[in-house]
Image: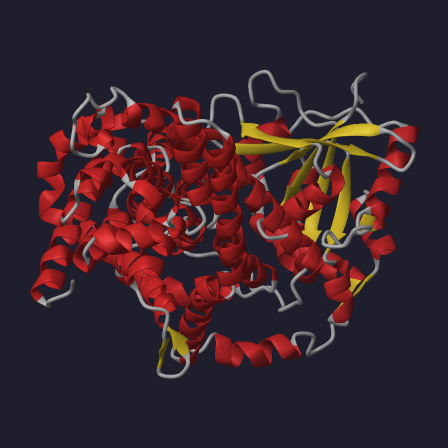
Amino acid sequence: MSAAAPRLALLGNPNCGKTALFNLLTGHRQKVANYAGVTVERKQGWLTTPQGRRAQLLDLPGTYSLDPLSQDEQVTRDVVQGRLAGEARPDLLVCVVDATHLQLNLRLVLEAQAQGLPMVLVLNMADVAQAQGMRIDTVALAAELGMPVVPAVSVQKDGARALLEQLDALFTQGLAAPLPAAADAGGVDPVALNQRVRELLALTLQVPAKRWGLSDRIDRFALHPLWGMALLALLLLFMFQAVFAWAAWPMDAIEAGIGLMGQQVATHMSDGPLRSLLVDGVIAGVGGVLVFLPQILILFFFIFVLEDSGYLPRAAFLMDRWMGLVGLSGRSFIPLLSSFACAVPGIMATRTITHWRDRWLTILVAPLMTCSARLPVYALLIGAFIPQRTVGGLFNLQGLVLFALYVMGIVSAMLVAYVVSRHSGKGQPTPLLMELPAYRWPSARNIARGLWERGLIFVRRVGGIILALMVLLWFLSSYPAAPEGFTGSAVAHSFAGRLGGVLEPLFAPLGFDWRIVVALIPAMAAREVVVAALGTVYALSAQGEQVHEALGALIAEQWTLPTALALLVWFVYAPQCVAMLAAVRRETGRWRHALGVAAYLFALAYLMAWITYRVAGAWGAT
């Protein structure tokens, strides 16, 4: 063992609960970065045992084998074998397996044994295995493998106690020095490996004949080619209905608080640049984005519930066949699903795709998935222009429009993938390897932690990049001041107004005036900034009491419906996110790929917004 605190590494298959166990062990004592020289994310933290011993813990990317097929699997192999420059091998491997899928998970454990590192085997989801009637003889399994075996339940507060106590025992007796790593992890005979797994299961595992009775009965409907797709569509539709219906009162409360704050500041400060900065820049801008926090949390609540219940792998199974029809790999589903939260982790998740053609095609369409940053823009425009009424006595019209925008992004992504794949040749098929876990009740603790983290990320963006951009936009919109006798809007005379005036002819065919153009410029940093930018521009350009009116009421009065619809469609396609383009550059290694993505998305956004504006105008929408 190293003289300093021991270094532990979590090794396991994807979806075995490894990261949940990492979060349980480290709590908030963790950080996220990239491995040196590669763009694969690493999570690193510290754990403390019951006897007060500290150890450094590394969460390795999930893999099915130490014979890598993708970049993240290669990093896992390199860490275990000590191939990464400047990084020593771990002192101990903590192999995490899904106790309900031992047949698949034990293959990796046997491969890892050849690497010569001290090991502990963790049977995660032990409670689920027990509920299914499975009986695992941990004493016999430990004797056969020659390593400690402990149960764990990573979704329970005290679910890792047995592991921590085992670590204390190992640290007390001292970890054995690592042996030389196997030169070739892929040299293990797969036939012998499978035979050894079968022997271990025969000696240590008892499985009832119908342990998945309930899950199987549910899957007869949930995985049906017709009814399963209908269920998925209804779940998504209900989710988007709830985004508007459930968020109404907390959004009203936040909006009222922001309005009161602006009024108090305006009342107690004398007129001048500082008051304008606080009221028109900070409060109008940042507050206009913060009001959409309830809708974002509701959206992620549903995503976390579907993920924690075991339904999301079923959704991937249902979508795999349809994605294959348009040229996408079955492995593309998870990156595209991640892109609904944010395109950046979605693009990073394409590392699991083996073939470059499939990976590039997934990167190309990932930005068309409707990320959470678009939600404040959609909510503002839908709330201002789409009436709050019930359709068919059941559905909320605003929720239906939001659902249609998400569907538009998905359908567009499939069409782009189909067109590009038709002209790029047929790639090698990449099968979708994914376990279908038993259905389970979602963990309230996991959901609460996930919502807290997502809320913090959003608030930090509001208090960081959005605040900085709003201060900059306020300055550009306020200076130079309009001269004496100037009859127009003061902001039109500013730097921002002049720039908007120069670009307005380019966007006029879409129905966008110079105020919208000014708001689109800082939105290149982050999509949701456009709401704060509109709030700042309209607060500075409004007259008298209009300064304190809600932004939605102002734009509903001054814009036409075709303009609002065109802007909604613009945000379905346009790549208003520098971070996304940087992720494309980082993952592909070339700026020409990032610029190509930006060019095709801007062209698509302009074309679709123009069509929307013309069609809506021709139908008489006002």
Q: Is residue 563 above or below residue 534?
A: below
Q: Position of residue 369 (x, y in %)?
A: 35, 52
Q: Quadrant of the N terminus?
A: top right
Q: Single out the residue that lies furthest toward the bottom.
A: 393
Q: Is residue 182 visible?
A: no
Q: Position of residue 184 (x, y in %)?
A: 56, 32
Image check: 245 left or right of 166?
A: left
Which of these two is toward me, 346 or 378? Answer: 378
Residue in the image at 25% along x and 44% along y: 574
Image check: 355 left or right of 292?
A: left
Q: Is residue 521 above or below residue 328?
A: above
Q: Is residue 137 above or below residue 65?
A: below
Residue in the image at 62% along x and 20% along y: 87
Q: Position of residue 468 (x, y in %)?
A: 43, 27
Q: Position of residue 374 (x, y in %)?
A: 37, 48
The picture quadrant where one finds residue 526 is top left
Image check: 614 left or right of 589?
A: left
Which of these two is toward me, 7 or 410? Answer: 410
Residue in the image at 39% along x and 34% along y: 280
